[in-house]
Amino acid sequence: VAEISPKSGERLIVKTDAVVEGRHYLASDPADLVARKLLRVNLSDLAGKGARPLGYVVAACFPDSVSEAWIAAFAAGLAQDQKVFGLPLLGGDTTATPGLASFAVTVFGSVRGRIPRRADARIGDDIWVSGYLGDGALGLLASKGALGGLSPDALAYLVDRYRLPRPRLDFGRRVLAHARASMDISDGLIADLQHICDASRVGATIEAAALPLSGAASEVLADDPDLLPTVMGGGDDYEVLFTAAPAKAAKIAAAARAVRVPATKIGRIHQGREVVVLDRGGRKVELGQRGYRHF
Amino acid sequence: VAEISPKSGERLIVKTDAVVEGRHYLASDPADLVARKLLRVNLSDLAGKGARPLGYVVAACFPDSVSEAWIAAFAAGLAQDQKVFGLPLLGGDTTATPGLASFAVTVFGSVRGRIPRRADARIGDDIWVSGYLGDGALGLLASKGALGGLSPDALAYLVDRYRLPRPRLDFGRRVLAHARASMDISDGLIADLQHICDASRVGATIEAAALPLSGAASEVLADDPDLLPTVMGGGDDYEVLFTAAPAKAAKIAAAARAVRVPATKIGRIHQGREVVVLDRGGRKVELGQRGYRHF
């Protein structure tokens, strides 16, 4: 049993997530990266609400057959990111399982002022994202050897982005003061924007040409434009997706510059319920792969 | 992402616990009871700190082969105990696993005033427990058919106590205002009292004759006195174990009467580090089985 103490005037939020061997990661993946991604995926949820991390608890189920070395590397990964993010371990439970490994992390954050909800988008809002889209989904393909003809640097960049998300905590805390609806992108841009549209009872249009792409992702898309749906629907982005009144654009841009993470306006909220993507010529892009993908 | 809102002036505590198929329960156990025990085990931790339940989050990993009926019964069990304990579900994550089922619950509680710690025992304190000891451990034996010659009523009572713990929430909130050290008993009386002694840097002596036993447990022990170590070390009690200044005895008894749960003085804190059990004649009882047992 542990105590959690948000500062006075701050509101406490909580998020829980499970990862499972053979579903979210492979037993052959480096244990320290499995641990760090587990924390970062949850931290990304806090980033999407503009929260400051307060701490976490973890329930770890290790297979009877796990090696001491694997557990040690897993613990070292947790310890490393505890330091990186100033995220104390508040408690936990460790148990052996006759099955596969599974881990559940519950992370706590505090928010000063308003907590931006999915349901807060309004007609006329701009749609924004932090950072770059698609690196995680393309990194998964790259790590499986499914992306040919990529430069070694681009390959390494994408695989790293897949394995080790960068939760946009500073971005969330600085930029979301100017936002209406907000959440982090984990299931893919289209699926998560649809979540916002469903909750806010609005529709959305995205300009494909406006999507922010890393150099590596641009290289991949130039080679194979058919991967655009993967960029928009593949998931594992862990960027912040938010809407804001058009009058806030300058403040958003300034706040994003201050934390040195790009903020890009990618579309507009309007009446309806649907998420539509338009190409450079104003034609609807077919979205084969929408959201939520596990291997 | 969910918000947790303790009342002003209250302190927030958190506890997380994992249960795993094949280790903490069997796939053949009723799914609703698996779910209810999962919640109750965590609520017992809150009871041991005198906390009021605020809500919980759950991360559930269901095997690919699980039936819809099992999941429905599991969810119904959660819903039932949400009502019983006024415990809202604040969030969760559900995932499929190629392995066995596992569940992690993180429960939140609020405490008004001081949170009693394991490290708060002082030399001269009385040692108290709520309710009855050993019913859970004997219930596990009974459910395996390992207890012969028991009346059907006693058998049913013990199996039920093993399957469905009664977290002593009212007791904790009313009685622990008068306590020093406190925790709930999950690993067994001896192991958990040793935790208090280690944290408080004290020793403890228990009078075996003073241990509160249910009618069913008395029946079992009369038949086989060698089961005393199981009663003291078997675990699954989910009672409150606490120490208090002797001057508080009358207030403790009155508070316990008010919530209609027995409070029993079973021993004394003294110098040293060890936990000793004395029989009626003042001889040391050998403790074969100490704490922590899973099947």
Image (spheres, coloured by chain):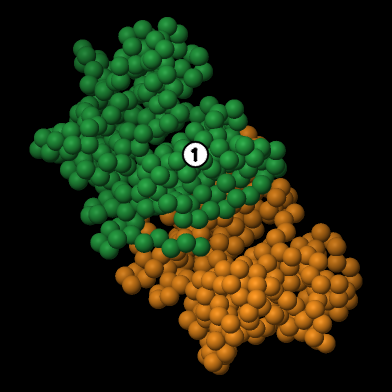
Chain colours: A green, B orange
Element on which disc 1 rests: helix
Q: Residue at x 85, y 61 (%)?
A: B145
- Which residue is more in the foreground, B152 or A102? A102
Is residue A268 toward the left or the right of residue A117 in the image? left
Q: How many marks?
A: 1
Q: Is residue B187 left or right of residue A111?
A: right
Compared with residue B31, is residue A7 higher up or lower down, i.e. above or below? below
Does the rendering let one see residue A274? Answer: yes
Q: Where, by quadrant of the figure, is residue A244 drawn?
A: top left
Q: Quadrant of the C terminus of chain B?
A: bottom right
Q: Position of residue A179 (x, y in %)?
A: 20, 42
* Picture coordinates of residue A217, whole percent (x, y): 34, 17
Q: Of the residues shown, which amino acid type is indicated by label 1?
A: Gly
**Disc 1 target residue:** A77
**Residue A136 location (% of width, % of height):** 40, 26
Left/right of residue A45 with respect to residue A268 in the rendered view: right
Residue under the image location 53 percent in, 33 percent down: A24
Q: Which is nearer the eye, B150 or A54?
A: A54
Question: Depth check: A275 or B103 in front?
Answer: B103
Is B90 situated above or below A137? below
* Residue at 45% over, 29% down: A163
Please provide percent x and percent y for residue B286: 81, 72
Pick the front one: B141 or A118: B141
Q: Is residue A107 above or below residue A146?
A: below
Against A181, residue B198 (above or below) is: below
How crowded pointer 1 is (Cα within 10 Å; few <14, some 14-19, many 20+) is rated as many
The numbered mark 1 sits on a residue in which chain? A
Q: Residue at x 68, y 53 (%)?
A: B24
The image quadrant that residue B282 belongs to is bottom right
Which quarter of the figure has residue A20? top right
Q: Can residue B157 be seen here?
A: no
